[in-house]
Structures are given as C-alpha cells and as structure tokens.
Amino acid sequence: MGESTNPEVDRLASCSYVSLATFKKDGSQVATPVWVSHAGDRLFVWTEATSGKVKRVRNGARVLLAPCDARGRLQGAQVEGSARVLSDPADISRVERLHKAKYGLQFRLFETFGSVFRRNRGGSVALEVTIPDRA
C-alpha cells in the first residue's frame, strides 16, 4: 500500500471509517461515512458513479475528512483536502484492490450484495483525495 510521508494521511488511513464532507453549489456541506484506503500520500474512496458525492466533487474539489464511526459521528479533527473522480478502469481496479486488502471479506460482501440490491446501475468509481502536508 505504500507508506505515506503525510501524518494526516496516515491518521485517516488507519481508520475504519472516515467522514467525507463534500460541498453543494450553495456552499453547504454533506458528510458521509466512507471506507478509505491509501497508497503513498493519496487516500481513496470507493463509491457509486452516480452518487451525490461524485456529483459534488465534480462541481468542486474541496472536501473535509475526519475519523468517524459507521454512523458518521466524528471521532477526531477534520482536515481539508481536494478530491477528484477516477473513472479509468485501471484506476478503479487499483482502488478496488486497495479496499479488498484493507477491508477483506467485508468489502467483498458489500460489493456482491450491493450489485444485487443497488438501484444505481452506473457502476463504481473512486475518489482520489489529496491532503496538503502541514509539516
């Protein structure tokens, strides 16, 4: 998975869940608990291609991240970053491998059952999140 040189990336990558806050056009934020993996100094989120967070990231790259529980209750300080949507099949495959390595059977079950029950048939994409090094 590659070691990070950014302590904030290390802190967030060690969490089971991270609150990802994206911003609407009116400036209001929408926070969602997500699984996060990392490679080097980049964090990655796996999500549906037609999800609201993807739409909001396409409209503006600014995001806030913080450790949280499965319900989204913050468990640490927020940090600002920027996100971009990865839709290239090679990038998606790489992020899928990272998530499988971190979350194992839990991620595999999520993907298997999700593909059966999801209303969305747009497929999956990944968000790549960059956090400025404060050091």
Image: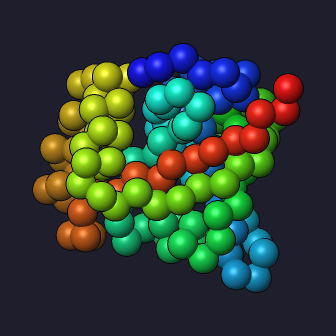
Quadrant for residue 27, please give it.
bottom right
Q: Residue at x 58, y 47 (%)?
A: 129
Name the spot of residue 22 as percent of width and height, x first: 65, 62
Q: Furthest-right residue in view?
A: 135
Seen in the picture, residue 87 relative to 105 is either above or below; the reply is below
Seen in the picture, residue 57 relative to 19 is either above or below; the reply is below
Task: Name the side, left or right, on which 48 lies relative to 111.
Answer: right
Q: How is the image coloured?
A: rainbow
Q: Residue at x 18, y 47 (%)?
A: 113
Seen in the picture, residue 76 relative to 96 is either above or below; the reply is above
Task: Name the side, left or right, on which 111 lies relative to 27.
Answer: left
Name the spot of residue 54 as percent of width and height, x first: 48, 66
Which quarter shows the C terminus? top right
Q: Furthest-top residue in view?
A: 3
Q: Residue at x 55, y 37 (%)?
A: 42
Seen in the picture, residue 68 relative to 103 is either above or below; the reply is below
Q: Nearer the viewer, residue 66 or 135?
A: 135
Q: Is residue 69 something that shows in the picture?
A: no
Which quarter shows the N terminus? top left
Quadrant for residue 21, please give it.
bottom right
Q: Nearer the viewer, residue 56 or 40?
A: 40
Name the spot of residue 61 as percent of width and height, x first: 64, 64
